[in-house]
Image (cartoon, rainbow, N blue to C red):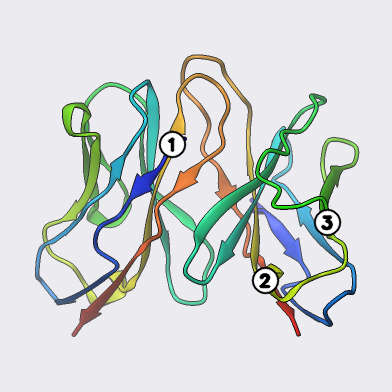
Amino acid sequence: AQSVSQHNHHVILSEAASLELGCNYSYGGTVNLFWYVQYPGQHLQLLLKYFSGDPLVKGIKGFEAEFIKSKFSFNLRKPSVQWSDTAEYFCAVNEGTGFQKLVFGTGTRLLVSP
Amino acid sequence: GAGVSQSPSNKVTEKGKDVELRCDPISGHTALYWYRQSLGQGLEFLIYFQGNSAPDKSGLPSDRFSAERTGGSVSTLTIQRTQQEDSAVYLCASSARRKWGSLTDTQYFGPGTRLTVL
């Protein structure tokens, strides 16, 4: 079965620090990849997605992610975090052959101190 | 435009009672999904509806769980004889369409229903 691993469960950074959150998935076929964010008290929102094409994907709020097929990875990055980036981040995958069930990682809680 | 809405936002029930959770997808979205977010378990897929096709129920954890979607729009998730382990946030998502072998549409999530079983 498809699985998604997020290795960092809790990350604490100071403002202006760089961020990289790891995401690895297990499926070897065609995949679609997503990062969702859940700000405190809010619902899940899409940060960015990869379907095909350029493996470096840019999303909202200065986030980007790179799909590295050989490593089964889709790490999320931001060069300079802000206090408002404090949230929980979820990596998700679905198989690219039609059925759109999302398989989520367990999430990473990011705390950015001002 | 309006997003996915869910009701109630919070539900507290006693063990053994039945509960119904409602989801209103984004207008025009043909696909609807239910997920469950449990403490320490992350987000788990429960069930998926696409148009008039038979739903995929492969994620339902037991036969106490069922869902229906009326008129291709509103969906209700029913949990019978609730147990304490059913306590979680139940999330609904919708997407515009399903395409084979190519781009898939993004799932947009509702705010969830927080279910507490005492």
Could you tell me residue A63's position as x and y percent?
A: 24, 52
Callout 3: residue from which chain?
B
Horizontal side of B73 relative to A14 (left or right) equals: right
Q: In the image, what residue occupies the spot 23% across and 54% down? A: A62
Discs 3, 1: same chain:
no
Residue to which mark 2 is pinned: B85
Could you tell me residue B22's position as x and y percent?
A: 81, 59
Could you tell me residue B85's position as x and y percent?
A: 67, 71
Horizontal side of A29 relative to B49 (left or right) equals: left
Label 2, residues with CA under 10 Å away: few <14, some 14-19, many ≥20: few
Question: Which amino acid type is marked by label 1?
Answer: Gln
Q: Indicate which disc, 3 or 2, sits on the residue closer to the N terminus.
A: 3
Callout 1: residue from which chain?
A
Identify the secondary structure beneath mark 1.
Answer: loop
Q: Quadrant of the C terminus of chain A?
A: bottom left
Question: Which amino acid type is marked by label 2?
Answer: Glu
Q: In the image, what residue occupies the spot 64% across and 50% down? A: B1
Q: Nearer the viewer, residue A28 or A20?
A: A28
Identify the secondary structure beneath mark 2.
Answer: helix
Q: Is residue A71 visible?
A: yes
Identify the secondary structure beneath mark 3.
Answer: loop
Residue to which mark 1 is pinned: A2
Q: Is residue A52 above or below residue B46?
A: above
Q: In the image, what residue occupies the spot 69% across and 45% down? A: B26
Q: Nearer the viewer, residue B89 or A79?
A: B89
**Marks 2 and 3: in contact by CB < 8 Å?**
no
Residue to which mark 3 is pinned: B64
Callout 2: residue from which chain?
B
